[in-house]
Amino acid sequence: MEKVIKVLHVDAGTSFYRVERFPVGPFWGPVDLGLHLTGREAGRHGVLNFGTGLLAGSIFPGSNRLIFTGHSPCWGGFYVSAMGGAGLIFDDLGVNMVSLRGRAPSPSVLVLNREHGEEVQVELAPVDPGRIWASAPGGVYAMMDHVFGRWAREFKQTPRVLAVGPAAAATDFGAIASAPYQDGRTTHADCWAGRGGFGSKLFREHNICAVIYGGTCLDDDFRDRAVADEWFRQRYEKKLAAKDFEATTKYRFDPKFGTGGTFGVNYSTLGGRLLAFNYRSALWDEPARTALNKRLVTDHYLKQFNEETIAKKQQRTCGEPCSAVCKKLNGEFKKDYEPYQTMGPLCGIFDQRAAERLNRHADAAGFDAISAGGVLSWLMECLHEGLLKPGDLGVKSLPRWDAEKFDAVADSAHNAELGVGLIDSILESRGVLDLSLGARKLARRLSRSRGHEIGRRFVFLANARNGWMVPNQYWNAGALSPMAVMGKYYMYYGFDFVPPRELGRLNAGRMIQELIIDDLGICRFHRGWAEEMAPDIVQHIWGDSARFQEVIRATAGRVNSRNVAVFWESDRNIDFLLGFLKRKRDVEGDKNPELERWIKAFEADRRGAALDFWYEIRKGVSETLTTLY
Amino acid sequence: MIYLNGKPREHREGATVREILESAGLDPALAVVTLDGTFVPPSDYGRIRPAPGARLAARKMMEGG
């Protein structure tokens, strides 16, 4: 097995490239090494790293994630973003990671091809991204098709394309997209490194609008199924494939709920925890929330999904063979819970046709879909409340946000059309919509010039001076935690009340677990076995699980040492938290005296209690991730 | 006797976290576990044996994404 991690350094400014080798032991994977390279080059170069874990190409399902690391333009700190399946073809390059630095003289495509021989062939080819993005099928999809069409024939085996869209040029939260191609055509099973704005980083800092890669390198990957089956049998009395099948039930089809995928299972179980209309539902009473959920989600939005996607078994994988078949589709539209939540109920959209229209537009533009939906719902509320006028935002209408009279089809379509208009306004910087430096900066500017009521409605996590992130779409305290990396699942986001100090400790513990599978490049949809088995697998293959776990803990500590989380700047964040706490007590009957104490503290001094709650979480994080000698 | 999610529970001495969870009908793969307030990594479920009187909390792991 591999004893070194090979990094291909590419300077986009000079086309200079070289390979550097790092020993396995001090380094283990794309996260800890990405953090090292980001720190090593800090002050000299901004680097964007992308690569696979040591298990890429192995028989372990879900082990081919492509992991991106670097300083995030929107978060304002070190970030980790993971893309499903794209590591399988990357593994054919015969390197473990690419570390990109420098800025190409003009917008370019980076071509990485290893056709026999010892070296990866590196080429930077200038292109006109504006013209490509404007061509059919538009944005990132046009970029993927263009790059695949122009270069794929130069590869012996089907290559993979990473692409950005116009959001990468206009904002700090552009994502990176990649869809597997089969027989020369896209599969529509888009995979995204969505969070962290690495599309914006790739384009604005390196002037790269796409990467195409592939090769024929065969390396020494772990492929012994009989041996792996024995490891799994010892732990679970099941073979690897059987355990993986069991662990991925939710993502494929869960008979308990008669649905599958994150969209299906989450909406089947949310009930009164539904978040809608820019989180205003957190301020409603439970009967109002459950009535909305029943009428618009269960009986329409979810029903459509189950009939169109689940019943017709429209599902695919991310590109690697996988029993989870987690990509749930309706034709060309892929449905994930969080994008279809933020550009769904959060924007006042409860119809699949309308959500498809808006999500497709945002995806084609290449946005981090979760953050895009959070920004759109905030802007829609500002329009709804008269805090901003349509002309301020370059649109012509107001949202239809009357929950009681809401028409699931017509009003959803109207709101989606408004969302499409707002996206175009963002891309063209119409009116006040300059998001080049991010949504927090915009909220600050609008709050100063137009009144604080605008900023107080934007739910986001604040980091450092300008960093921001729309939280994961789970109504609980964990989603608003002051962690060093937020917007992914480096925290505990269960729906139970956990006293904040303990929540901080749980967050830290969960962060370490998530780092283990990210650093090995394993998809978190397989964590039902991966978190438990990963140390064993490392021990069996590399013989030093203790060192691996030590590096992971050190990585968590080093990431946390850069934790510059800022206390919630938006009053709606406090509504979100307090609504969650009250619901636990009043609806779910949680009698924990600590919960009662916190609610009373909020009622006595809302902002002071929020600050205390926030710091208590932070204390729990710090006491867990700081080593005391 | 141990406490599982705040409730007293008969305890076989030497039982692992995994065995306690399974005997309570909980799926270890879907649990976030603390033992006396300290987070327990899943890889330790089969190794750690709570002492009598220990407070074990098993919270449901959300399957987000």
Image: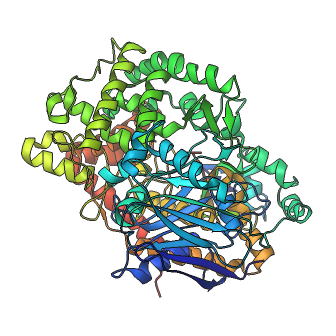
Residue A52 x %, y %? 63, 66
Image point (70%, 59%), residue name: A530
Q: Position of residue A138 (x, y in %)?
A: 44, 38
The correct choice, above or below, for A290 with respect to A506 in the image is above
**What residue is at 32 percent from the left and 62 percent from the top?**
A615
Residue sticking out furthest to the right? A226
Q: Nearer the viewer, residue A628 or A207?
A: A207
From the top left corner, tell me how far across and down residue A415 is, in percent.
33, 24
Q: Left or right of A191: which side holds A167?
A: left
Kindly indicate the quadrant of the structure image that contains residue A282.
top left
Compared to residue A581, the image places residue A155 above or below, namely: below
Q: Is residue A475 visible?
A: no
The total of numbered circles placed on residues is 0
Question: Which quarter of the figure has residue A269?
Answer: top right
Residue A68 shows in the view: yes
Q: Is residue A528 left or right of residue A335?
A: right
